[in-house]
Image (cartoon, rainbow, N blue to C red):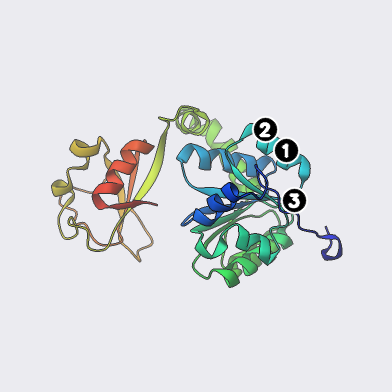
Amino acid sequence: MSDSTRHTVIITPAGMDAKVDARLAALHNHYILCGLGTTGENVLRELEKAGRPFVGIEESADRIALCRKNYPEALVIHGDSLEDEVLKIAGIERARGLITTIANDRDNLVLTITALQLNPKVRLISRGVDEHQSEKTRKAGAIVVSPNLIGGRRLATEMLRPSVTTFLNQMIVAKSKEVTRFEAVDVAPGNPFVGKTLADLAAFEKTGLKIIAVRDKGEKDFRINPPPTTVIKEGMAMIVLGTIPKVRALGELVGEME
């Protein structure tokens, strides 16, 4: 859609009444999802399963209606995510992350630049199809995910390692609230376990979770199957496999869910 024909209409599930205004105003460290097409709806479903606070933005009235039908409790804004005012209503200044699944790569680039201007600390994930445009979006500050690349890898893995893909797919498509996921928990500054070891934490005994991998703050690579003698540090990311309630239990011990 050209800039001259863009328009913004703000409509939320219950209209812009006091209750919805309050829900939007209360959002903090939440996620903003721009684009509720096929890819965006799958992202929305995952955010709901994970129990994370989020708000969606979509221009198409038909997609908005479908989203309200399938996800009646979701906060959704009918409007143009490239507009500053719409992003502000979605709480961009307080958001933890923004995911854009808009089909137009140039729009994703513009959205990345706009979002960073409004919140320099926001984490940005963008869909990308055209590699040339995707490189510009990366340089602008977003992590770019290519559906074509992911799809190609999935096809090969399905052929070469079918048991692995069956296991991962079981987690992805599960509908139970007790669904198992790979999750990350970050060690908070000043946590009592900082300076102690994983053996001291005794995560499995306290939460039923095994620490699969850890990564120190500022490091690029994870250490797989860390030994019990591993020292816990501020900002360390702990990767676990478990249900959301168990992961939250670990978060209460050392910090917060990533």
Picture quadrant where residue 84 is located: bottom right
Q: Please tell me which residue lies in front, 180 or 152.
A: 180
In the image, farthest residue toward the right: 4
Q: Are marks 3 and 2 in contact (CB under 8 Å)?
A: no
Helix, strand or loop at label 2? It is helix
Helix, strand or loop at label 1? It is helix
Q: Position of residue 49 (x, y in %)?
A: 49, 37
Q: Position of residue 79 (x, y in %)?
A: 72, 54
Taking the spot 19% from the left edge, 48% from the top edge, the residue there is 227
Q: Amino acid at mark 2?
A: Lys
Q: CA distance from mark 1 to mark 2?
A: 6 Å
Q: Amino acid at mark 3?
A: Glu
Q: Please tell me which residue lies in front, 55 or 34.
A: 55
Q: Is residue 246 left or right of residue 136?
A: left
Q: Which quadrant, please, contains the N terminus? A: bottom right
Q: Is residue 21 left or right of residue 210?
A: right
* Residue tagged 3: 59
Q: Are marks 3 and 1 in contact (CB under 8 Å)?
A: no
* Residue tagged 2: 69
Q: Nearer the viewer, mark 3 or mark 2?
A: 2
Q: Position of residue 185 (x, y in %)?
A: 34, 50
Q: CA distance from mark 3 to mark 1?
A: 11 Å
Q: Are marks 1 and 2 in contact (CB under 8 Å)?
A: yes
Helix, strand or loop at label 3? It is loop
Q: Is residue 50 left or right of residue 9?
A: left
The local crowd at label 1, few if under 14, some if 14 to 19, many if 20 or more residues have their Cα within 10 Å, is: some
Q: Amino acid at mark 1?
A: Ala
Which comes before the other along the chain, label 3 or label 2?
A: 3
